[in-house]
Structure formats: structure tokens, C-alpha cells
Amino acid sequence: MAEILNTSNCNECAFRSVLFENLNHEELDYLNFYKTEKKFLKGEFIAEENDPINEFLYLKKGLVKLFKVDRNQREHIISIAKPLNFVGFLSVFSNKKYQYSIKAIEDSIVCYIDLAPLKETLVRNGLFAMEVLEKLNKITDDILGKRLNICSKQLRGRIAFILLYFSREVYFRPSFELPLSRKEIAELIEMSTENVIRILSEFRKDQIISIAGSEIEILNMEALERIDKFG
């Protein structure tokens, strides 16, 4: 169950510039009154598909996955959200219920702001509204761009892409603990789990990566980049 944390002040938040730089102190204090921070452990649901949308969600720390479950109970991962991402944006202004589920894949801290006062602030502050719209468009473009990029690749290229993504855009180093299971990787890049395991083994045999459980180290970055580009 999520742990409610002591809420920091929006005026003093290190992440204020990500979205709230066009709000004055009075507007930030107003939103701060309706804000809560919660900690979720790895594997905990932050929101489930068809839950009512009552808050704006902002990921301060950790990693979460956005996914849908089909009629055969198979998960389809839409995207991975990292710190500074707004994890409810795809539904928050267009639906009354979540169209996907959100689950922590690392211990995560999520900032909740009640939706009604946020919408009121959007109506009053046009610059803030434009900023939110730009952010929403950027998130949508980023998700679509990654999906198209993945779908255009062969199987080896898809695995290379996801390894480079975690190395360059999430952890910013060549060695990291893979936050997804082999099954979840398959769900993210539209492959079978067996193919994910096989190709990771091939990369290890070719000394492109080393694997120790969930620990991954990229040993030959140039080779992985070539596979990503041409694979």
C-alpha cells in the first residue's frame, strides 16, 4: 500500500521549472494546498485501468510503466515513465477514467495534485495552459516516436534499442539493473519472451553485453549502436 509522505512546498521544489515556471507564488501555494506525495514500492499499482481520474500525477522519483491488458490477459506496455514525467497526461484531460494502468517498476515517489484546482488554474493562467499543452504534445510525440522506431526494427535491433534507451535516457551509464523482466521487455517491444532471452544470450556470447541476473553492462557500445541502427 502506498505510503503518504510529508509534502514539500511547490515554491521550493527542485522540479518547479519542468512545468510550473509560469505560475506565481500565490498560484503555487494554491496548488500546494491540494497536493499529496506518495511512495510506491516496486510492483505496486499507482492507478488501474478504469479507475476514476481525480488527480494530476507527477513522477518525482523512480520508474513506472503504463500498460493495457487485452482480453487474453496479456499486458501491452505503452511506455516507461521516468522522473520529471507526468504519468497521467494521456487520459487526464480527455477521459474521466484511466484508459491504462500505471505500476511502479522501481520504488517510486508520485506527486498528486487534485484535478479541479489544477483545471481552475489552467483557465486563469493562459501561459500555464499553453505550457501544459506543449508538454502533453511532447509526451504524445515521444511515445509515438518510440513505438514507430521499435516497430521499424528487426528483433535484434529492438533489443539493442531498449538496452540503449535504459543506458542513455534512464540511468546515464553503461551498467545498470534492468527494471523489467524478460517478459515485460517482450511486452514493451512486441516480441516473444523466448526471443528476448535468445537475443540477450546472443549479445552476451558476442561480448556486446554482460549479464548477471538483472544486471546489464554494455561492453561494446559501438556494436550495440550498429545493431540499433541497422538491425
Image (cartoon, grey):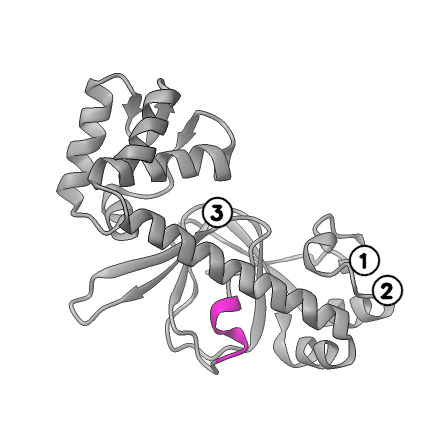
Tell me the chief SS of the magenta region: helix
Earlier residue among tags 3 and 1: 1
The residue that disc 1 covers is: 11
Which residue is located at x 72 percent, y 81 percent?
123
207 lies left or right of 33: left
Name the kind of residue labelled 2 in the image: His
Category of crowding for the residue at label 1, using alpha-carbon neighbours closer than 10 angstroms: few (below 14), some (14–19), many (at least 20): some
Name the kind of residue labelled 1 in the image: Asn
Quarter of the image where one finds residue 21: bottom right
Name the secondary structure under disc 3. loop
Magenta stretch containing residue 153, yes or no?
no
- Whole-percent x and y of residue 175? 42, 25
Earlier residue among tags 2 and 1: 1
Question: Magenta stretch?
Answer: 89-94
100 lies left or right of 4: left
Name the secondary structure under disc 1. helix
Category of crowding for the residue at label 3, using alpha-carbon neighbours closer than 10 angstroms: few (below 14), some (14–19), many (at least 20): some
- Whole-percent x and y of residue 109? 56, 53
Residue 217's place in the image compared with 23, above or below, is: above
143 lies left or right of 85: left
